[in-house]
Amino acid sequence: MQDKGILLESGTGEVEILEFTINKEHYAINVIKVKEILEVDYLTKIPNSHPAVAGLTLVRGDVVTLIDMKHVIEKENTDIKKCKVILCEFNNIKVAFCVDNILGIHRIGWNQIKKSEDVNETSLVIGNIIYNNKILMLLDFEKIVMDISPASGINEERMNDIEIKDRSDIKMILADDSPLIRKVLNDTLIKAGFKNLRFFDDGEQAYNYLISVADKKGENYIEDVQLLITDIEMPQMDGHTLTRKIKEHSILKTLPIIIFSSLITNDLMHKGESVGADAQMSKPEVGKLVNLIDKLTSEK
C-alpha cells in the first residue's frame, strides 16, 4: 500500500483511490466515498430482489444493502464468506459492495484519469488509470446503485414540489462526467423551464470555456453565463479544483458556483467551503437544486 498521508486539502488536483479486484481485473473507487473495509458474517436474503443484491447485513446496528460486484461486472455470484466488503456513503445513503480483494490506496492527480472510450449512458467506467503498469478502471458506483434501484437517483418525481415557469433567461453551464447524469439533469431542468444549458464532461473543459468568455467579455461575462453547477468526481479536473481556480480568477470570482455531488455529506461540506463554493447540494435532490438556482440567480 502506498502511504503518502491522508489527503486533507481540497482543490489540489489530487485524489486518493482504493484499488480492488474482481475476477483478477483491477478497479478503483474514490476513497472519499469509503467509510470502511469489513467482512460480512451476517447476511439476510431479500425475496424478489435484484440479482446483484446479495442481501442485507448489519453494520453497528445499521441495516445496509450488500451489492455483489462480481454479479454487476460478470453476472457471476460471489462466495460472500470469502469476499471483502467496501462500505460506502454517497447520495445520502450507506451501501456496501462485495469485491474479491483489496490491494491498497494510491494518491494520483485527477489529470491521470483518462476518460473511458465507452462514453454511453450504460457504461460503468468513469475513467481509466494507468498505475504501476496496470490499468485500473474507476467505476461509477452511483450508476450501479441507480441501475439496481432507480428511485435512489435523480428522477422526475423529485420535481413534484417545483414551480414550473419560464427560466430561459438563466444561462448555466454544468460539468459532470456521467452521460446518464448529464441527460437526466438536462431533461429535468428543461422541464423546470430552463433552456440555456451548456454541458461539459470534465472540469477542464468547463474552465477553459469560462476563461474564453472572461477573455472576450471581461466583467460582462455574466451576459453569457450566470451560474456554474459542477460535480466533484471528474477526469482531468475535479470540481473542487475547478471551483478554486474560478474563485481565484480576477474576473470570474463573482460567478455563483453550486457543487452538486453524491459526495456532499455533513462530514465533507468543509471541502467545498474551503474552495469558495457558494452552495453545495447532494445528488439526487434535483428539486432542491432548482430552488437553489432560483435563489442564487435572483441575488445577482
Image (cartoon, grey):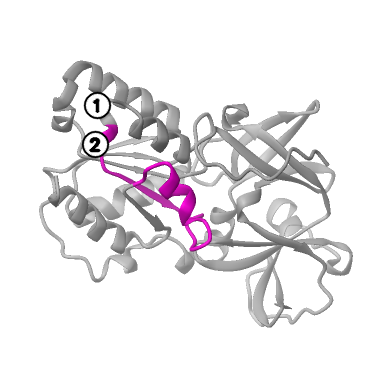
Q: Is residue 262 magenta?
A: yes
Q: Residues within 10 Å of mark 2 (few under 14, many from 20)?
A: some
Q: Is residue 153 left or right of residue 41?
A: left
Quarter of the image that includes the N terminus: top right
State the residue at coordinates (72%, 61%): 36
Q: Which mark is residue 212?
A: none
Q: Reply above or below: 1 against 193.
A: above
State the residue at coordinates (13%, 31%): 223
Residues 132 and 79: in front is 132
Q: Looking at numbered disc 1 in the image, what kind of residue is underneath it?
A: Ile
Point out residue 293 in the picture as x, y percentages from the top left corner: 23, 52
Q: Looking at numbered disc 2 in the image, what kind of residue is underneath it?
A: Thr
Residues 63 and 23: in front is 63
User: Could you give the CA–CA distance between mark 1 and mark 2, rounded to whole angstroms?
Assistant: 7 Å
Q: Is residue 103 magenta?
A: no
Residue linked to disc 1: 251
Q: Residues within 10 Å of mark 1 (few under 14, many from 20)?
A: some
Residues 178 and 40: in front is 40
- Answer whether labels 1 and 2 touch (C-beta < 8 Å): yes
Magenta residues (range): 253-277
Disc 1 secondary structure class: loop
Point out residue 78 in the picture as x, y percentages from the top left corner: 82, 62
Residue linked to disc 2: 254
